[in-house]
Image (spheres, grey):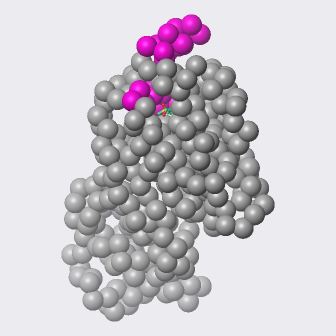
Amino acid sequence: MSNSNRQTISYLNRRFREVGLEPNKRHGQNFLVDLNLVRLIADTGDIHPADAVLEIGTGTGSLTAMMAEKAGLVVTVEIDEHLHQLAKEELEPFDNVRMLLQDALKNKNNLSPTVLAPIYEWINQAPGRGFKLVANLPYNVATPIISNLLMLELPPRLIAVTIQKELGERMMAKPSTKDYSALSVWVQALCDVSMARVLPPNVFWPAPKVDSAIMRIEPIAAKRAAIPDLPFFHTFTRSLFFHRRKFLRSVLVSAFKEQMNKVQVDAVLADISFYSPTTRAEELTVAQIQDLCERFRLASQSLR
Ligand code: SAM
């Protein structure tokens, strides 16, 4: 059956009924039923033969097939056995597609290593290769997947994903807004991020309760190079926003209580022009948080 017939509401409805299934809310099964938008996700991914594409959530395989026409390799992961079988029919003709039937996550916060292994193997076979995450992501796992990929030594060249619009807004949020969070700082410190398109609920089956958005998240090598210790920065940022309404000083005193006393924390803060006793983390720009982080990293190291 052609791609266009597979991704319609009536096809999905019938196919699910035939196998006695209901779309599974827990697995974020909301299928895009507008093929132009499926194509827009693939186009946002700007896929070339030197790209391996990681897709999390094969679904019926429509986006997978589109991407396979352009990519060197597509590794697509699906947790649901019925969907995995269904997509197999669609993806049979493509010898550059690897279908994995598994949870993309090893645990709540970490990607499964078996998902990345075939990608790295392919990248290492020839120079100039890299990978991209292009997917209509299951919403409940979008944050750990994106955060994890940015932590990798070899991060993706590009992330082009459909996620909840609200999550996309949080990634792009500016200081002193309610959406500004550790995720905003983490993503903006490492990437250029933009919203390519807002998608209303009715372009999905079943329709979710909220708007979605196609996001373009591009990791920038120079931004990454400006952060000497990525895991430290990640933990630091998370602890800053853990009690976002507290004053910065008290957050830092408690975050570094094992390594520094209050006098030592105050000595670091005394040198910082953007700090005052009433400063809160949520007011600081990404650059200021990076500066703060680096000062505390060096100070806590020198006291070891
Ligand atoms: N790509 C399809 C599309 O665009 O219509 C499906 C997207 S749907 C939003 C998300 C898919 O991810 C579902 O097929 C779901 O079963 C699968 N999924 C959910 N959680 C997963 C996980 N932890 N690992 C792998 N796949 C998962």
Residue at 63% across / 54% down in the picture? Answer: 49
Q: Quadrant of residue 123?
A: bottom right
Q: Is residue 108 left or right of residue 117?
A: left
Left or right: where does residue 98 sit relative to residue 252?
right
**Residue 149 or residue 222, whichever sits in front:** 222
Q: Say above or below: 87 vs 95.
A: above
| Foreground of the two, 273 or 243 | 273
Magenta range is: 10-34
Is residue 93 among what the camera can see?
yes
Q: Nearer the viewer, residue 105 or 156?
A: 156
What residue is at 58 percent from the left and 19 percent from the top? 1
Write down the quadrant of residue 62 in the picture: top right
The magenta stretch spans residue 16: yes
Please determine whether, in this image, residue 253 is positioned above or below residue 136: below
Q: Is residue 231 above or below residue 112?
A: below
In the figure, residue 77 lies in which quadrant?
Answer: top right
Residue 247 appears in view: no
The residue positioned 71% from the left and 43% from the top of the image is 96
User: Is 288 or 87 nearer to us in this picture?
Assistant: 87
Q: Is residue 231 magenta?
A: no
